[in-house]
Image (tube, rainbow, N blue to C red):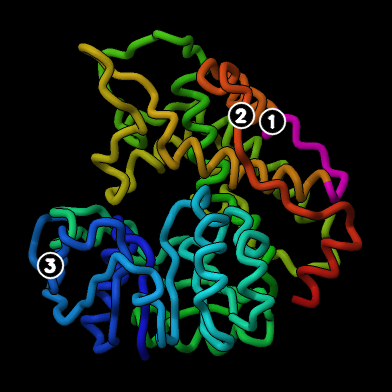
Amino acid sequence: MKHCVIGGGNIGTLMAAEMAHRGETVTIYTSSPGRFSDHIDVYDNQNNFLYRAGGIQVSGILETAVSGVDYIWITLPAFMFEHLSKELSTIVKPGQKIGIVPGTGGAEYAFGDLIQKGCTLFGFQRTHSIARLKDYGKSVFELGRKKELYIAAVQREDTEEVCQRTEEFLGIPCRRLPNYLCVTLTPSNAILHTSRLYSMFREYRKGKVYKENFLFYESWDDLASQVLFACDDELQLLCRKLHDLDLKEVLSLKTYYESEAAADLTKKIHSITAFHGILSPMKREGEGWMPDFDSRYFRSDFCYGLKVIMDIADAAEVDTPVMDKLWNWYIQLPENKETDNVPYFQIPISGMDQLYKIYAHG
């Protein structure tokens, strides 16, 4: 099989290396092709060398990268989906498979034109591994692979094939999800990152500078856990409301993290080795630090994660007061309020009938 991985960041670099190492033909599409080697070295979380993946092609021209490939893997943040979809719409061919990693962020709507062209669109519930770049374009850390992947295609009849193929490409068992809504509603970054950002920066005012860049997970606090669980409760209420759709694989975070109370969740997150050392989305400001509002943690996870879930809940007439509070806090941040322009993806759903039509029948 021939593959194009779109995005040369953490996940894109690791995916390209893994597939090339397993004998697949891989091209990486990136805005910085000159910084890439023709091979990628992979290391574990103890900095031990695992393997070298060679023969990887790199291109800065999208048409060259995707021409003739069987699978296109999109690892870019969700705020780039719509622009990328427009670029791909004149290039892709019917029958090409397009995988979104992870598949949240309204991907089924952002890439609607590609579906209409006859491409198969599918997504992972969560990324297959935590990854961090060691040396951009040359090496990457593999910090924790999933034991199992959960995948759905928008065209439900194609899910079995992409599951089988992905299992071959990555060497991880794959489970077929009953519909793409199981991906869209995954209680991951859309509520996890946004809850943590709120707990860290809820008292932020324009000009406020922090003494340090916080460790995002290792300094996780009980307030973040409380807000996260409250958002998860609202999400589970939405799943119960949509009882005619099979959403049992949208696991509650209490089940996923094996934690019943907020304090238990805080301890659990502190204990996850793969999360260690991850800094918060902040940037230098004089002698201190301030939130980096251009980070995907803000631009994607609020506008193309949390907001998508809220819109689906609105279509299903399910109240989400805690999610609403997070969203209203975000849009009222001084940097957003000044411009009065917070771009987000408004999903085109007006009621329950449309939800069932889209997700029950693909």
Q: Residue at x 68, y 80 (%)?
A: 155
Of callouts 2 and 1, which one flags the residue occurring earlier in the amino acid sequence? 1
In the rendered image, the quadrant that contains the N terminus is: bottom left
> With 261 as the anchor, is 62 left or right in this view?
left
Question: Considering the numbered disc 2 on the image, is that residue within a helix, a strand or a loop?
Answer: loop
Q: Is residue 256 above or below residue 334?
A: below
Residue that badge 1 annotates: 322
Q: Nearer the viewer, residue 82 or 218?
A: 82
Residue that badge 3 annotates: 37
In the rendered image, the quadrant that contains the C terminus is: bottom right
Say which amino acid is labelled 3. Answer: Ser
Q: Is residue 135 above or below residue 147?
A: above
> With 101 as the anchor, is 278 left or right in this view?
left
Of callouts 3 and 1, which one flags the residue occurring earlier in the amino acid sequence? 3
Residue 73 drawn at (x, y percent): 43, 71
Q: Residue at x 17, y 54 (%)?
A: 136
Q: Residue at x 49, y 72 (%)?
A: 99
CB within 8 Å, label 3 to label 1: no
Say which amino acid is labelled 2. Answer: Asn
Residue 360 drawn at (x, y percent): 80, 73
Q: Nearer the viewer, residue 153 or 25?
A: 25
For mark 3, does the 10 Å Cα neighbourhood hold few (<14), some (14 to 19), or many (20 or more) residues?
some
